[in-house]
Amino acid sequence: MSDIPPADEVRPTSTAARPDVVGIVGVGSMGTPVAQHLLAARGTLVVHSRSPRPDLVAAGATWVATPRELAEQVDALVVFLPDLPDLEGMLDGPDGLLAGAGDLLLMIGSTSSAPGVRALADRLAERTAGRVRVVDCPVSGGEDGARAGALSIMIGGTEADAARAAGILAPCGTPVHLGPLGAGEVAKACNQLVVAATILALGEATVLAERSGLDLDALWTLLAGGYAGSNVLNSRKDKLVTGDDSPSGLAKYMVKDLRFANDIAEATGTDAVILPALRAAFDELVERGYGDRDIAVSRRFVAERSTPAH
């Protein structure tokens, strides 16, 4: 027997007179500041997490114990889980999202496979007679950008759904509609390709400079004002200089992200030049036990692969 409610039990979609009721699942290091910005802008938010979040409740959120309760209460759901399998594991069963979903806009902020997002959207549309719609909206800017409400938000979906998602997510940064469903994930894969290349180059350059006797702080302060400058350098300069790679943006996630970029390269017939080298480097980095460190571990990774000349 299906856990999906029949059509005559579905709540009406939101209207201009009744704004969307918004929910969020995945309130970790990125999802928590996103939730805080949504709360500040809307005054209310429905949250589902493995354990209660009294901090968000104190700010005005409603915490619910199951995905079904979440879906029953919201018109739009922001998802900041690590990947699609985490979301798919919440869909079915008597307490799953689909058991409580009426008309629902599912906004997938996870960094995921573009074909995977499209396939999930097709399955949900078929199973719910089109009542559950999907946009992909991965973000860039890291924890600092999330806390500052300055994320770059990459949206893929129909014009109407993307506009609705952009309005909801605007307090969290700059949402831009880039194309049809999956376009956001393609953009995020491109972003991660650039970030991976940049942090590896910064780590390697730091080792070269240190072994050559340069003042690292002076070096990166100077180079940040030229073509070598970037947001990656600005956010990781202190870590690169001091060798602090305590966790922030975990290096192991690059393995997944670069795999998604490779899928896009294969699908588009692109004979990538840098991507294979980046994949090999981050695979090796994780195999060496650095996956749970910050991406600034690239400095230590390069340094420990070789012995300095004397």
Image: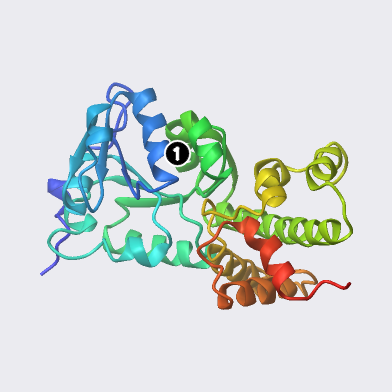
Q: In which quarter of the image is residue 287?
A: bottom right
Q: How is the image coloured?
A: rainbow
Residue 137 lies left or right of residue 47; in this view the side is right
Circle 1 packing at 10 Å, graded few (<14), some (14-19), many (20+), is many
- The residue lying toward the viewer, choosing from 99 and 208, is 208
Residue shown at 78% from the left, 62% from the top: 204
- Say which residue appears at 20% left-offset and 44% top-offset: 52
**Side of 130 where 70 appears, left or right:** left
Query: On the rendered image, what quadrant is the N terminus found in?
Result: bottom left
Q: Name the residue under label 1.
A: 165
Q: Is mark 1 on a helix, strand or loop?
A: helix
Q: Locate residue 21, reporting x and y percent.
A: 28, 33
Nearer to the camera, 223 or 52: 223
- In the image, residue 77 sits, relative to residue 254, either above or below, namely above
Q: In this view, does 287 lie above or below 229?
A: below
Q: Residue at x 46, y 55 (%)?
A: 110
**Quadrant that contains the C terminus:** bottom right
Q: Indicate left or right for 300 with 224 as reference.
A: left
